[in-house]
Amino acid sequence: RKEVEQDPGPFNVPEGATVAFNCTYSNSASQSFFWYRQDCRKEPKLLMSVYSSGNEDGRFTAQLNRASQYISLLIRDSKLSDSATYLCVVNSDSWGKLQFGAGTQVVVTP
Amino acid sequence: NAGVTQTPKFQVLKTGQSMTLQCAQDMNHEYMSWYRQDPGMGLRLIHYSVGAGITDQGEVPNGYNVSRSTTEDFPLRLLSAAPSQTSVYFCASSAQGRVETQYFGPGTRLLVL
C-alpha cells in the first residue's frame, strides 16, 4: 500500500468554479503536511503547508483530518492558470524524508 | 540566485553505460536530495545529504551512488544503466529546519535503451 494516496483525476473544472480533492496517508505518526504544485513537465513547487486548524492562502484552503488521516485542498474561483498537478506531501521523519503522492491533475476549462 | 540547477536536461543511454547527473545550488542549503518521478508513482527519494561529507540512502537507492564533497554540489551517478532507470530525475535542496520548502531543479529526463 502506498504511504500517500491521491485520486489521479483529472478533475475538469469550469473557470470560476470550486474544486476540492483529498489525499490519504497511512502513517499515523506523520508530523507535517504540504501541498505542492507541479506544472506539466516542470519541477514541483511548494503551494502551501497544511496546519491542524486548517488554513487559507487566497483562493486555496487546506484542511487536515488526523482522525481519518487525510488532507484536502479546495480551490475557489478557479482560474485557467490553476491547471496543474497537485502533489500531496507528508513528512513522517525528523529529518524530513518527504513522502509524495502521485498527484491529482486539475484542468480548468474556459 | 540561480537556485537549483541540473545538467543535462535530457539524456539517452544504452544499457550498461554509466553517467553522472549534476546538481548544484547557490542558496547555501545544507540539505540536498535526489528523487525520481515515474508515472503513477509520485516522487521517490533515491539518496539525500544533510551536509557536506554526509549522505544516506532513500527509498530506492539501488543502482545509484552519490557524494557531497561541497555544500553546493550533489552529483548522482548511475553505475550501469538499466531500462528500469528510465525516469525524470529531480534534485532538491532545503535549508536546515525548513524541510517543507524544498527547491527543485528543472529535472533531467533520462531514457535507457
Image (cartoon, grey):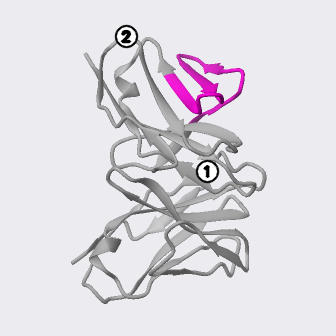
Q: Which residue is mark 2?
A: A17
State the image quarter where residue A83 is shown: top left
User: Helix, strand, or loop for circle 1?
Assistant: loop
In depth, the one of A37 and A19 nearer the eye is: A19
Q: Chain of mark 1?
A: B
Q: Amino acid at mark 1?
A: Gln
User: Helix, strand, or loop for circle 2?
Assistant: loop
The residue that appears at 25% across and 16% down in the rendered structure is A110
Q: Chain of mark 2?
A: A
Q: Which residue is mark 1?
A: B102
Q: Tag 2: Cα neighbours inside 10 Å, few (<14), some, or many (≥20)?
A: few
In depth, the one of A51 and B110 nearer the eye is: A51
- Does the stretch in magenta take in A69? yes
Residue extending farthest to the right is B97
Note whether A71 is above or below A20 in the view shown: below
Q: Amino acid at mark 2?
A: Ala
Q: Is residue A99 left or right of residue B41?
A: right
In depth, the one of B9 and A72 nearer the eye is: A72
Tell me where the magenta segment starts and ends, as one range. Answer: A47-73
Note whether A58 is above or below A47 in the view shown: above
Q: Position of residue B59 (x, y in %)?
A: 53, 66
